[in-house]
Amino acid sequence: MEVLSRADPPPVPYRELTPAAGVGVLVQRAVLRRSLDSISRRRGLLLTTDHIHQNSRGAALVAEAIGTFLQTRSG
């Protein structure tokens, strides 16, 4: 969680995903051809594009957590 504590500006608090926000992300991705990381930055989000779906930073944190868990389980 160091990523969140070092963020400048601070991360945007969670908000429920609205249909308009979901469509907005789809339009930016499909029509405007923006990357998921670019969409996140423009929306002030650090780990997701829409408070649900991860960008590359969020996905890397999830992958790291899963990898650590699997290593501890396999001995």
Image (spheres, helix red, strand yellow):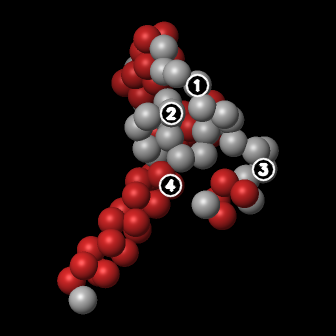
Q: Which residue is mark 3?
A: 8
In this rendering, position of residue 65 left or right of residue 1: left
Q: Nearer the viewer, mark 4 or mark 1?
A: 1
Q: Residue at x 29, y 81 (%)?
A: 71
For the residues labelled 3 and 4, say whether their Cβ atoms are less than 8 Å apart. no
Graded by Cα atoms within 10 Å as few (under 14), some (14 to 19) or many (20 or more), the crowding at tag 3 reads few
Under mark 2, the amino acid is His
> Which is nearer the N-term, disc 3 or disc 4?
3
Graded by Cα atoms within 10 Å as few (under 14), some (14 to 19) or many (20 or more), the crowding at tag 2 reads some
For the residues labelled 2 and 1, say whether their Cβ atoms are less than 8 Å apart. yes
Q: Residue at x 46, y 60 (%)?
A: 61
For the residues labelled 3 and 2, say whether their Cβ atoms are less than 8 Å apart. no
Q: Residue at x 61, y 60 (%)?
A: 1
Graded by Cα atoms within 10 Å as few (under 14), some (14 to 19) or many (20 or more), the crowding at tag 4 reads some
Quarter of the image that includes the C terminus: bottom left
Q: Which mark is residue 51?
A: 2
